[in-house]
Image (tube, rainbow, N blue to C red):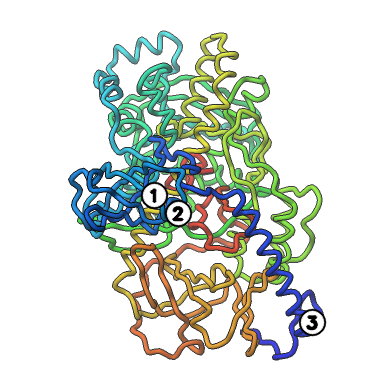
Amino acid sequence: MTRYTDNESFEGGRKRSRSAMNMSAAQRRRNREIQAMAIESTSPQCIGDLEARGPLKVKNQVIGILRQHGTGGVVLPDPAFRETDFGAVVIDKNHLNGAPFEMAVVCEILNPEAGKGELRGTIKEVLGDIGNNDVRMLTVLRQFGLSPTFPEAVLKEVEPVSPSLDEETVNKEIAAGRKDLRDLLTITIDGEDAKDLDDAISLEELRNGNFRLYVHIADVSNYVREKTALDAEAYSRATSVYLVDRVIPMLPPKLSNGICSLNPKADRFTMTCEMIVDREGSTYDGKIYESVIHSDARMSYNECYRILTEPKDSDEEEYGPIVPMLSKMKVLAEILKSMRERRGALRFEFPETKVILNEDQTVKAVMPEPHNFVHGIIESFMICANEFVAKTYCSMSYSFVYRVHEDPDPIKIARFASVAKYHGAMGRLSGKIQPADIVRFMDTIGDDDALPVLDQLLLRSMAKARYSSECLGHFGLASKYYCHFTSPIRRYPDLMIHRIIKSHLHGENKRSHFGGIVEAAAEQSSEMERNAVDAERASVDIKVCEFMADKVGECYDGVVSSIIESGCFVMLDSSVEGFVPFRTLSDHYYFDEQRYRAVGARGGAVINIGQHMSVIVDNVDTELNRIDFRFADEFENTPAKKGRSSSYKSEKPSRGGRKTGDYRPSKGLSKGRPGGKPKSFGGRSGRGGKKGRR
């Protein structure tokens, strides 16, 4: 650990006196007060100021525990949902509506414009005992306006849909122009537990050494038509939501897990993006068309990884021509990855949290989401298709929905650069910053321990990716053209894109029609994506706290992942993150914003991001979803039990091949908790990680 003397500090490469340092601290306090006033002036002043949330447009609603209060009751808002906590809500006896006390309830606010502590409400729903696993997840559903069921009108519309394609239907479509690709070797590659398989791959190596890549995507638009109850519901949801213990699908399971899913040994209608890719990774020719495929096999990431890294003599007999196709897929994916790196696509390296449940929905384990290079193979092919589709329709000036990631704010990037330089980064990030500039800057960092944390700080310094009717490019991918084409089962923008493409293929003159609706669809999808991300994080937080609740007193190794004025966050090898309050330490620590570290005022001890620490689980609050640690070793000498270490060992990529990541950061160089861990770019760029946010 770095230490400074009592009377001096180093900053910007020169000694500074204690008085100068104190003056800076005073200035920092004034700046924080000004910022706090600015935030307060724009913050919601009452619950009525909050925007409606989720597909159900939840508004003026509080989730909490109903307690007896005089002849009536009072609802204490669930502290896990701080944004709706404007104080206790008084329930008149006539508004209890038979609800029992000490239960989790949904409360509607009767006077939403009232100030804090003056709210009155009525009980709308009793969720149950908050200690019940299912009830905790129900609070997430209600808080974020998510419905696990579909309206009766929607279910009636999908009722006649056949679970399979008959030969007559297929032949009729082929006669109308749909291309028959059923004899083409085709596979899907997904996680073992995936049910909605919306993309499949075929690959051929040409005589000149180039590749013909087919990306087949479920033709959801064939079943979800405009101006139907089904389409209205899909538009409202805009995305599937992946909570820890359940999926809230965008489409009814009869479609998402049935006729739209590209299940093996079954004919399925698809939209195919066929591309010719050369040995430099350039896509110089291609076309998009309606097709019918017959998937030869449902492969998993782990299965393909084993075939490519630990081949068996029996593989050829069991998998036949799939084995050499997998080898070609690996070669092409490496070519595409190298091409993206040359143009400056950003690379990130940090874990997502995977929660494994027992049959009774209790938590069995928490670990970093496993990721191997086969995930990268599929990701590369999805990116290739998304870029080709976006470029094709942008060049025609067609009304479209693009996935955009705008240039970062230079001020936020400059703040990040000042922190990164303390960890060895060299060079400058100023002026019109290009993605390649950031890659070169990050590659100069020699502090491998701090690198994953710096990746997260960089991510939060950038804009959020969103949907737009304008083609504004994707900064993170260093791509001029980008859209989401590859996951129409779980994302509405992809479904709308398919409709637009099919309209163009059929020669329909509907430019003005789509021109009038694409921006609204883009805004709705962006809003619902943000809501889904928040709900997913909330569900993870609940289950992680549940998992750690019986581990108080146990000792673990971790890394400092973030620092704020009141303490620091430490992430364990399992990806569990907890907070160490500075008040639990013997010295007084102040937060050095410029270098993103904490310095002891008397002893000069320094706590840096990326620093390895041993911590003891001090407290787990399952109501607040908060985990508190305290330092072991020289910081604290309290005896502790040795915690159970995870047997999972992550496959750490090399510096030159760091995983790319999704652009859903929080504000600037956030001084608070990282807002839930940023999800990796990985997965399907269409299926990013397991949730598909790019």
Residue placed most toward the observer, 624 or 628:
624
Mark nearest the camera among 2 and 3 is 2
Task: Judge by depth and name the residue closer to the eye, 143 or 279.
Answer: 143
How much space separates mark 2 and mark 3, taking CA atoms?
45 Å
User: Which residue is identified by label 2?
Assistant: 116
Residue 594, image quadrant:
bottom right
Q: Is residue 139 visible?
A: yes
Residue 596, image x and y in percent? 65, 70
**Amino acid type of the residue that numbered disc 3 sits on in the rendered structure:** Arg
Q: Which residue is mark 3?
A: 16
Residue under label 1, please give it: 119
Q: Of discs 1 and 3, which sits in the foreground?
A: 1
Does label 2 or label 3 sit earlier along the sequence? 3
Residue positioned 63% across, 74% down in the render: 591
Left or right: 441, with 335 as reference point: right
Give the x, y percent position of residue 37: 64, 57
**Percent x, y for residue 479?**
66, 39
In this rendering, position of residue 297 left or right of residue 291: left
Which quadrant of the rendered structure holds the C terminus? top right
Mark 3 closeness class: few <14, some 14–19, many ≥20 residues within 10 Å:
some
Classify 10 Å Cα crowding around label 1: few (below 14), some (14-19), many (20 and above): many
Quarter of the N terminus within the rendering: bottom right
The residue lying toward the viewer, choosing from 626 and 332, is 626
- Seen at 50% across and 87% down, the residue is 635
Q: Amino acid at mark 1?
A: Leu
Q: Secondary structure at mark 1?
A: strand
252 left or right of 94 in image = right
